[in-house]
Amino acid sequence: MLLPPAREKAELLEVVRITDPARHIRSADLTGDVTAIWNAAQAEQTLALIGELPESELHRCFFPGWGVRAHSSTDLLFKIAFCFRCHGARLWGAAVSHGQDGIHSFDPDSPAAVELLRRFRDSASGRE
């Protein structure tokens, strides 16, 4: 998955368990329960996994269950909501160009996606 150039400025990631997935197709915010805050190595590793997500065929449902908010030392840079059922990841935020803003496909069965989902689930269970 192609990440915005602002990815290089990201120092912290909030992992969000999305509680109302139907609202995230056009919502300006990413709402849900924060299950973890990752900085330094964890944030970099997670962004690397997201960057490695290969494309796939996009389906239609888009009911994301997980998301991340990427922050620099001073600003919220971008948000990504992931739907592992429809193979869609919505990317948006102040540091995202108009051409990158929107839903991108990813392969949820790829090793990077499987590891990403494992990390999300572990954060919710306190095993991160």
Image (cartoon, rainbow, N blue to C red):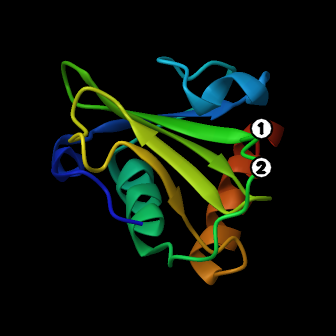
Amino acid type at circle 1 is Ala
Task: List x then y, in percent, for residue 8.
Answer: 17, 51
- Quarter occupied by the N terminus: bottom left
| Residue 108 sits in quarter | bottom right
Measured along the vertical axis of the image, is residue 39 above or below residue 111? above
Task: List x then y, in percent, for residue 128.
Answer: 67, 48
Measured along the vertical axis of the image, is residue 25 above or below residue 81? above
Tell me if mark 1 has few (under 14), some (14-19) or many (20+) residues whose alpha carbon lies within 10 angstroms of its own: some
Amino acid type at circle 2 is Arg
Residue 35 visible in this rendered orientation of the protein: no
Residue at figure coordinates x 35%, y 56% from the top left? 44
Helix, strand or loop under label 1: helix
| Residue 62 sits in quarter | top right
Residue at figure coordinates x 20%, y 25% from the top left? 73
111 relative position to 86: left or right: left
Q: Which numbered marker is on residue 9? A: none
Residue 80 visible in this rendered orientation of the protein: yes
**Which residue is nearer to you in this view: 4 or 48?**
4
Residue at figure coordinates x 83%, y 40% from the top left? 125
Tell me if mark 2 has few (under 14), some (14-19) or many (20+) residues whose alpha carbon lies within 10 angstroms of its own: some
Task: Verify CB contact (< 8 Å) between mark 2 and mark 1.
Answer: yes
List the residue tagged with mark 1. Answer: 124
Helix, strand or loop under label 2: helix
Measured along the vertical axis of the image, is residue 5 above or below residue 80? below
13 relative position to 58: left or right: left
Measured along the vertical axis of the image, is residue 78 above or below residue 54? above
Task: List x then y, in percent, for residue 16.
Answer: 63, 31
Task: List x then y, in percent, for residue 41.
Answer: 37, 55
List the residue tagged with mark 2. Answer: 121
Q: How many marks?
A: 2
Gap in Å between the C-alphas at discs 2 and 1?
A: 5 Å
**Which residue is nearer to you in this view: 18 or 43?**
18
